[in-house]
Amino acid sequence: MPAKKTAKPTWAAIRKHLKDLEPEALLSLIKDLHDSSPGNRDFLQARIAAAAGGGAALESYRKRVTEPFYPARGEPKLKLGEARKAIREYHKATGDAAGTIELLLTYSEAGAEFTNDFGDIDERFYDSLCSAMDDLAARVRKEGVTAWNTFSPRLEKLVSSTHGIGWGYHDHLSGVFDELENHFNNR
């Protein structure tokens, strides 16, 4: 007879257990989580840095976003999923909307620069860049005119830098920029 599967504790059960822990035991648990994986460590460091108002977390994640395009050593691997994952992790860890927009724009700029340096890539590459631009546009609309005023000069420069890039990339970026410009100028 097969062994019975034991049910994993629900968040409610975990929460109840955590509430009953003494502060030292809770700190020990958090330290163990920190030490158990780089992802946990990055998450905790970003959350603490964001709470303290420092930009160190943003810079750490910016490196993770640009690394697939321009690694510190070796040839580019173009593991775009890792860059996008870093952006999601930063947002989840910090809740910093402006920082998330910054990372999405950094990703898009790095992709355009990479194309201008090395030539057209492939459809998957540009689909990822277009998806990031759509995400960026939604976040700028949500954050409002302050975000638009902050990021529009770089967005305009990005669109200009993509002139002549294939796969519909330039057209997509132009369309997104025009839509944002119309949205904020017609208020």
Image (cartoon, rainbow, N blue to C red):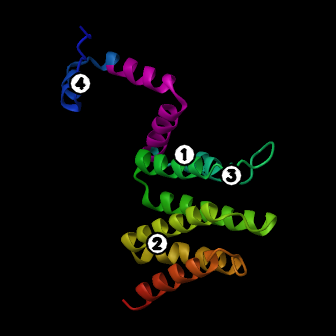
* Quadrant occupied by the C terminus: bottom left
**Residue situated furthest top in the rendering:** 1
Looking at the rendered structure, the kind of residue marked 1 is: Ala
User: Magenta residues?
Assistant: 26-51
Instruction: Give me the C-alpha separation between circle 1 and circle 3.
Output: 23 Å
Please report whichever mark, 2 or 4, sits nearer to the chain's N-terminal start. 4
Residue matched to label 4: 9
Q: Which mark is residue 78?
A: 3
Q: Is residue 18 above or below residue 106?
A: above
**Residue situated furthest front in the rendering:** 1
SS at badge 1:
helix
Instruction: Give me the C-alpha separation between circle 1 and circle 2.
Output: 23 Å
Instruction: Give me the C-alpha separation between circle 2 and circle 4.
Output: 39 Å
Instruction: Give me the C-alpha separation between circle 4 and circle 1.
Output: 32 Å
* Number of other residues with Cα within 10 Å of mark 2, as a class: few under 14, some 14 to 19, many 20 or more: many
Tag 1 near tag 3, CB within 8 Å: no
Looking at the rendered structure, the kind of residue marked 4 is: Pro
- Which of pointers 1 and 3 indicates the residue nearer the eye? 3
Tag 4 near tag 1, CB within 8 Å: no
* Number of other residues with Cα within 10 Å of mark 4, as a class: few under 14, some 14 to 19, many 20 or more: few
Residue matched to label 1: 57
Q: Which mark is residue 137?
A: 2
Residue 68, position as x, y percentages in the image: 68, 50
Residue at position x 33%, y 21% from top? Answer: 26
Residue at position x 41%, y 70% from top? Answer: 138
Q: Nearer the viewer, residue 28 or 162?
A: 162
Looking at the rendered structure, the kind of residue marked 2 is: Ala
